[in-house]
Amino acid sequence: MRSKIVVAGILAAAFSAMQAPALAADMTPFGDAKVDMHKYKAINRVYDVSYDDPKKLNALVGFIKNVNAVVPGKAVVVLHGAEIRAFAKENYEKYQGVIDQLAALTKEGVEFRMCNNAMHGAGFEAKDIDGFVTVIPAGFAEVIDLQQKGYKVIDASVSPVKDSRFIDHPELKAQPAAQPKS
């Protein structure tokens, strides 16, 4: 009896997996998305970062890596929100994982600049901040200055997209994701 239930479950899962792509194709009149994996020219960019929670820096790491992987050029991160406390030496142990990842990005040429006003407003001095960060007079002014020098501003607001497909269709989670065609 138990083996029949297991076999029935396996068959149901297999049938569901085979039907899901076919059902998805029937759900819209627009067909499949086009794929255009073109190359980007060099673009210098400034990431404008002002987070209310240092935990959002984890998403920033991936965001920067994803952009840097496909867009050549210089990258500057301007910090002027509550995330600055993660860069304080006294908080290194608490935020070590993400701080180590951000510091590693400097080896790839990414620069980190912190707003002096925000730093002081948070109660820190330059001596309190990790050594891979440069303290600059003002965050917004730095963004404007870099923009005047040809840098493109990237709003570094990040919303996690990982597995968001499965919010509406949890039954698809067991299926492997399709790989893009080259």
Image (cartoon, rainbow, N blue to C red):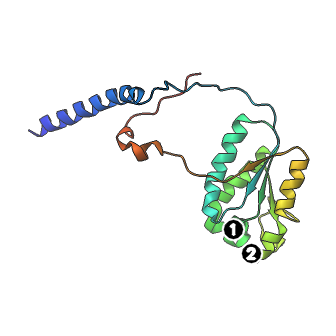
Q: Secondary structure at mark 2?
A: loop
State the image coordinates of residue 58 (x, y, percent, origin top left).
Answer: 62, 55
Q: Could you say which is closer to the camera, residue 160 or residue 24?
A: 24
Residue 85 vertical placement versus 65 (above, below): below
At x 48% / y 46%, what residue is drawn?
164
Residue 138 vertical placement versus 1 (above, below): below
Most extreme residue toward the left is 1
At x 76% / y 78%, what residue is drawn?
123
Evaluate whether residue 112 shows in this view: yes
Residue 98 vertical placement versus 161 (above, below): below
Q: Secondary structure at mark 1?
A: helix
Distance (Cα) linking label 1 and label 2: 8 Å
Residue 87 falls in image quadrant: bottom right
State the image coordinates of residue 109 (x, y, percent, origin top left).
Answer: 80, 46
**Within-10-Å neighbours for mark 2: few <14, some 14–19, many 20+:** few
Residue 16 falls in image quadrant: top left
| Residue bearing the label numbered 1 | 82
Confirm or deny contact between disc 1 and disc 2 (CB under 8 A): yes
State the image coordinates of residue 92 (x, y, percent, origin top left).
Answer: 67, 67
Residue 66 vertical placement versus 124 (above, below): above
First reached walking from the N terminus: tag 1 or tag 2? 1
- Residue kind at label 1, given as amino acid type: Ala
At x 82% / y 71%, what residue is drawn?
117
| Residue bearing the label numbered 2 | 122
At x 66% / y 52%, what residue is drawn?
60
